[in-house]
Amino acid sequence: MADKIELTINGQLVTADKGMTILEAALSKGMYIPHLCHHRELEPVGACRLCLVEIDGKWKKTVISCKTEAKEGMVVQTETPEISEIRQATVELLIADHDVDCLACGQNTRCALQRVADHVGLNKKRLQRLKPPEKKLPIDDSNPFFNFDPNQCVLCGICVRTCDELQNVQAIDYAYRGLGTKIAGFGDKLRIESSCESCGECIVRCPVGALTEKDSPKPTHQVKTVCSFCGCGCGLLLGVRDNRIVSAQGNVNSPANKGRLCVKGRFGYKFVNHPDRLTSPLIKRNGEFVKADWDEALDLVTDTFSKNKGEKFAAIASAKATNEDNYILQKFTRAVMGTNNIDHCARL
């Protein structure tokens, strides 16, 4: 097959798509190579240096697997003594500079650094020789939807690249140099003062607990649905706990959004749980609203509409409705109510 290649990884023959990197080829077959900065939707940068592999034969050298294209006939080793020693030293340096209160971390059990550390294996005596940070950096909780804890950050750059490559916002970047390097907005100001649009795409891609959603308990189950904020039809997975919506996640299988969400889709669900939310129709009687059933409410609407046809009537369509529903509304307004008085909140 012209679009396929074969290479050997740790003694196993692997068939991969032409153009795949060594890391992608391995991961596609369930073969784990430690990594922190890699994400399938982003351009590789090789920042974490954990995905080192050794290529034998005519290509013999040590390379970063996330940036090295897999070639026909390659023989790759991912766990040589030299590579294991380099990885262990790299992970130990990350751990020494990392807030390791894992049980209190929102990414506990889902943390990529935990998985890497478990795979590499840590030596407690070696860790104790390393000097921990002299002071903790302040947590940026200025954004109403999420917190940024620089003490948990491993400087993988996934959030920076997400904001740049996927969102084209460029609200954050690396700031300072050396041991003082951190992720920050322009002028190292609070996140709320940056050009951040609060889409949350950086949060869902953060491999550790540096970016965490506020007040978001883990759901007991998820319900597949469609976002109701506009007519794009983005797929949602709503997290439910104790009959309350506690999270919203993009559905990667939805053709409309492929897992991505805007600020409304990701964080705009809390109105559902609000105690003032209407749960039944209200009809005004004697100057006050009283509860009614749907048949009674629809009968009242029908009767009122029938008495106000023509130029008395106007309709406002909604961006929260689908194109088909908006078409029906304009058809109803013109054909049934006999007027062209119809508009749309987005003038679409």
Image (spheres, grey):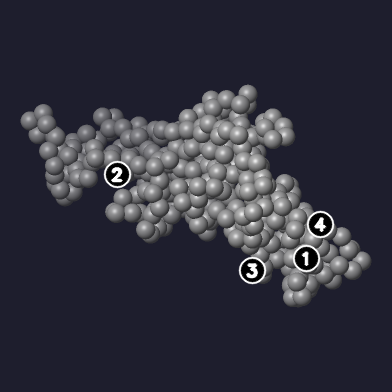
Name the foreground residue: 49 vs 335.
49
Nearer-N-terminus badge (4/3): 3
Residue 112 image position (x, y, % from top left): 59, 54
Given this view, does label 2 or label 4 mark the residue nearer the observer? 4
Q: Please say if the residues under marks 1 and 4 sit with CB atoms less than 8 Å apart.
A: no
- Residue at left offset 60%, top offset 29%: 185
For disc 3, the marked residue is 30
Q: State whether residue 149 appears in this view.
A: yes
Nearer-N-terminus badge (3/1): 3
Given this view, does label 2 or label 3 mark the residue nearer the observer? 3
Nearer-N-terminus badge (1/2): 1
Name the foreground residue: 338 vs 62.
62
Q: How crowded is mark 2: few (under 14 residues within 10 Å), some or many (20 or more)?
A: few
For disc 1, the marked residue is 80
Disc 3 to disc 1, C-alpha distance: 19 Å
For disc 2, the marked residue is 273
Given this view, does label 4 or label 3 mark the residue nearer the observer? 4
Q: What element carries label 2?
A: helix
For disc 4, the marked residue is 63
Q: Is mark 1 on a helix, strand or loop?
A: loop
